[in-house]
Amino acid sequence: MKFYNIYIRGYCHGSSKNNTGACSAIILDSENRLVDSVVQKHYSSTKNRLEIMAAIAGLEYFNSPQNIIIYSDLEYVINMINIWIKGWKKRGWVKRGDKEIVHLDLVRKLDDLTSRHNSVKASWVKGGEFNEMAKQLAEFAVKPDDFDAEIGVTRK
């Protein structure tokens, strides 16, 4: 069976809410050959939100349904993909006890994208070459704009 591996990373510059951050997705084929990468800079965000955005960016890369394994070092996103979304959806997009879902806008988008693919599973990864590559891409995207001008980089 053909499948793709996506290593994701959300990075936030600073420790408070509403910091500049970035998300990245490294897309590999089933033999771990690099297919492409996606990196996006975001303003006024958090680490958890950026990690969800990284998963979304990786899934949006594909124009047709695929079998996908998403790798993250954040259990929050892994549990969301593998377990929580199904229950939240059944309960009308609320947690047990009618508690509000944090980042519901992104959770619903993630659910929509996962349903468009043949299969999407998430797996925990600690370190490793591709996880580190995703981290470096996200961190680089957060460099100050004057750094971009200095080296002649134009970012979307």
Image: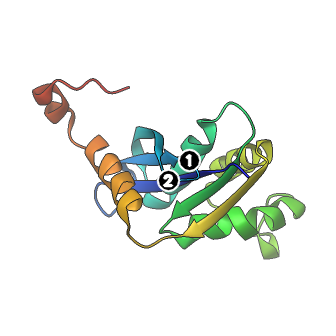
Residue positioned 49% across, 55% down in the render: 7
Residue positioned 68% across, 30% down in the render: 63
Label 1 sits on residue: 29
Q: Amino acid at mark 2?
A: Asn
Query: In this orientation, which residue lies closer to the viewer: 66 or 11?
Result: 66
Q: Secondary structure at mark 2?
A: loop
- Left/right placement of residue 127 relative to residue 81 reads left
Q: Amino acid at mark 1?
A: Asp
- Left/right placement of residue 100 relative to residue 29 reads right
Which quadrant holds residue 95? bottom right
Which quadrant holds residue 129? bottom left
Q: State yes or no: discs 1 and 2 in contact (Cβ < 8 Å).
A: yes
Mark 1–mark 2 Cα distance, whole angstroms, equals 5 Å
Question: Is 35 drawn above or below residue 63 in the view shown?
Answer: below
Name the mark on residue 128: none
Label 2 sits on residue: 32
